[in-house]
Amino acid sequence: MKIVIHKTLKHYLYKSLLNYKKCKELLINFIVMKLNILIIVILLMVSCGKNNKTAEVFKEVTEEAVESEIKKGDIELEVYDYAGFETFLNRKDDKVYVINFWATWCAPCVKELPYFEKLNSEYINKNVEVILVSLDFPHLYDKKLKPFVKEKKLASKVIALDDVDMNSWIPKVDKSWSGSIPATIIFKNDNSKFYEQSFTYEELEKEVKQFLN
Amino acid sequence: MKKAIKIISAALLVLFISAFALNNMTQKGYGIGDLADDFSLKNIDNSMVSLADYKDAKGFIVTFTCNTCPFAVLYEDRIQALNEKYGSQGYPVIAIMPNNTDVKPGDNMQAMKQRAQEKGFTFPYLIDKGQKVYPKFGATKTPHIYVLEKTKKGNVVKYIGAIDDNHEDASAVKIKFVENAVDALLKGEEVMQKETKAIGCSIKV
């Protein structure tokens, strides 16, 4: 269920491929334009080969770099379908879970994120955990979601839910949910409450406190 | 004296309950089988549009949508296709933009006009200025569809929810909820799936 995407690796592979393609293009242009300077073409071919080798070396180096970056954990994203995600909702370990559904494209969601972050940091020792469930479009994970998480330095756990069959899973989260976001579910063991609304920090704290008593 | 207190408390109770019921109704909006009130909203061509203007319609595909919500944008072509397919069969699309344009300037009348022109919308694209219409329907997000059937009693709500079951990829859609609903109504049959859920952008107040 868990998919880890190595963005930078893909990027570099693509880049080295592009390099080779460009070289080839240049060659073809040359042949068409000046047939009489074949010698230069041969020379160029030789240098192209060299270029390719450096590209390979470059790739090796970047692979190492990517590995160390992943160790730091800043480009890792857990992606779940609903069946995988459901395990988060079924935890019964006396902890208060605050699960917020959001997306980078949702302005009111982005506005209230700092409150969830604050809650997570202030209540971390009181057995409260915030989980931010992104509903961003999968093709924008690399372009939008990961840079956002990195830039805002989100400390709460961020996961992505990718399941297009919304009509099946939305009512499973809560029967009353019409599907608009932001939406939040707070629960502790079998006791849970669902909110299809935006929060201020005070409102959010008040709700969480009800679960702590 | 005791009687007076009893009467007052009973009156208060009735007031309290009715206030609650009213509040509940405005929050929830129409359900399946309810009659939808007509409205008069400004179109992108500056004309005022009402459901009553459509004398020959058999019903309507009322679509709450906007320019700025990525989900709504993903469905733009499919909304246009619905109007092309069902407009001539008596079920035109009536699109309503419900957002507060002070909060979302990208949804103002000028932007709506531009968007409609770029995409070649053939349906009316109305602005819910004053935001009085969407709460009556109970729309909470964009896109949010209400299929209405015109009857002697009025326009009856027959379907509420999403257009289909795959927002990301129109070619991978398995169930076309709105098409199924309108097809059933055109055949005089019962709509099988009356309500569906989908993620959308909350309407900006």
Image (spheres, helix red, strand yellow):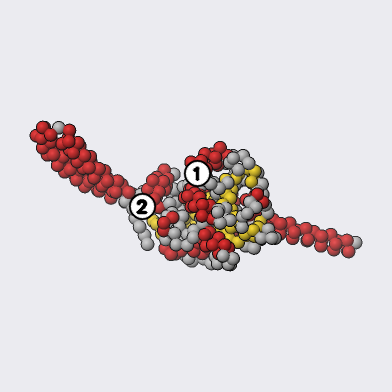
| A116 or A173: nearer the viewer | A173
**Residue B81 in picture, x, y percent from top left:** 49, 52
Q: Mark 2 lies on which chain?
A: A
**Residue B23 in picture, x, y percent from top left:** 69, 55
Q: Residue at x 58, y 67 (%)?
A: B189
Depicted B139 relative to depicted B107: above or below: below
Q: Which residue is drawn at 49% across and 64% down?
A: A168
Mark 1, other Cα within 10 Å: few <14 / some 14–19 / many ≥20: few
State the quadrant of the N terminus of chain B.
Answer: bottom right
Q: How many numbered discs, if any? A: 2
Res. A193 in view: no
Query: Which residue lies under the disc numbered 2?
Result: A76
Mark 1 and mark 2, same subunit? no
Residue type, numbered disc 1 = Gly
Q: Nearer the viewer, mark 1 or mark 2?
A: 1
Query: Which residue lies under the disc numbered 1?
Result: B120
Farthest residue in the left direction? Answer: A39
Q: Which chain carries label 1?
A: B
Q: Residue at x 49, y 60 (%)?
A: B176
Report how far apart the C-alphas of labels 1 and 2 lie in the structure.
41 Å
Q: In which quarter of the image is residue B8?
A: bottom right
| A92 or B160: nearer the viewer | B160
The local secondary structure at tag 1 comes to: loop
Q: Residue at x 48, y 41 (%)?
A: B118
Residue type, numbered disc 2 = Glu
In-image side of B204 versus A121 (left or right): right
**Residue B65 in picture, x, y percent from top left:** 55, 49
The local secondary structure at tag 2 comes to: loop
Q: Which of the numbered marks, if any, corresponds to residue A85?
A: none
**Residue B163 in picture, x, y percent from top left:** 51, 57
